[in-house]
Image (cartoon, helix red, strand yellow):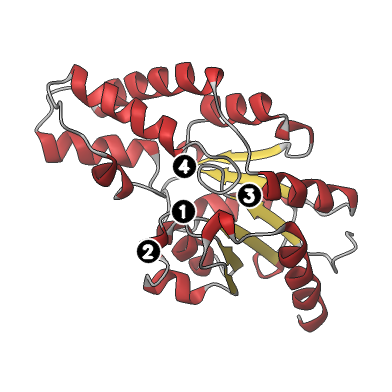
Amino acid sequence: MSTLGGISVIFDLDGTLVDSEPNYYEAGRRTLAEYGVPDFTWADHEAYVGISTRETVADWQRRYGLRASVEELLAVKNRHYLELARGSVRAYPEMRKFVELLAGEGVPMAVASGSSLDAIGTILARTGLNAQLRTVVSADEVERGKPAPDVFLEAARRLGAEPARCVVLEDAAPGAAAAYAAGMRCIAVPYVAAQADAPEFATAGLLVRGGQEEFTARAAHDWLVRTARTS
């Protein structure tokens, strides 16, 4: 049992642990350009933050009337993304500190992401976070992506943890909704500042309204300690 009263921590990956959304946007822009959609903007991309890659490309297929299959679009986007991720991806410094702090206290941790297993593995290896984060769940491995709770519940199962004893870190409204649906507490660190007032974030136990610029490992740890004492 960890020093935090048996609490386990489950991290979203993109936009939470690592600043990978720019790479995801660029991968999406390149993919859509290949299929005749030349004007995909960052504002368009923001609507998909927190949604699994598979569900994102399925929506593109419908929205843009693409003839390619979801599987083909998924493969092309993942190829572009992996090329970008191998070249440049960074972990948020305070999130890295938080992971290291929890690892030092023996807190069970997992990553639960809408990205593919290849993408998750590449990012964790590239940033060195794979040393502490060995339990990984992709939305490709469960029936439904966020905002359904499936990926978080599977992470809890693999950790051998009760959902009520899990705390999720999330940057996106669908992820906060998924944590709530899973019966887990949530530390929300909005990637898109304008979304901080989204109703899904109102369910979070701790909402860091200023996002990564405001998040600190020490404040998050102190909140976990208080949570462990009162639960």
Residue at the spot of label 2: 195
Across and down, in percent, residue 16 comes to 56, 49
Q: Cα distance, mark 3 to mark 1? A: 22 Å
- As drawn, 55 above or below 121: below
What is the secondary structure assignment of the residue under circle 4?
A: loop
Residue at the spot of label 4: 114
Q: Residues within 10 Å of mark 1 (few under 14, many from 20)?
A: many
**Of the image marks 2 and 3, the number of the one nearer the N terminus:** 3
Residue at the spot of label 3: 155
Q: Nearer the viewer, mark 3 or mark 4?
A: 4
Which residue is rendered at x = 46% and y = 36% of the image? 140
**On the rendered structure, is 38 left or right of 119?**
left
Across and down, in percent, residue 228 comes to 79, 74
What is the secondary structure assignment of the residue under circle 3?
A: helix
Whether pointer 2 and pointer 1 mark residues with C-beta atoms closer than 8 Å, the reply is: yes
Which residue is rendered at x = 42% and y = 48% of the image? 145
What is the secondary structure assignment of the residue under circle 1?
A: loop
Which residue is rendered at x = 40% and y = 17% of the image? 79
Q: Amino acid at mark 4?
A: Gly
Q: Nearer the viewer, mark 2 or mark 3?
A: 2
Between residue 190 and residue 172, name the one nearer to us.
190
Which residue is rendered at x = 38% and y = 37% of the image? 53
**Of the image marks 3 and 1, the number of the one nearer the N terminus:** 3
Residue at the spot of label 1: 191
Across and down, in percent, residue 66 comes to 13, 28
Where, by quadrant of the figure, is residue 55 drawn? top left
Q: Residues within 10 Å of mark 3 (few under 14, many from 20)?
A: many
Q: Amino acid at mark 3?
A: Ala
Q: Residue furthest bottom?
A: 230
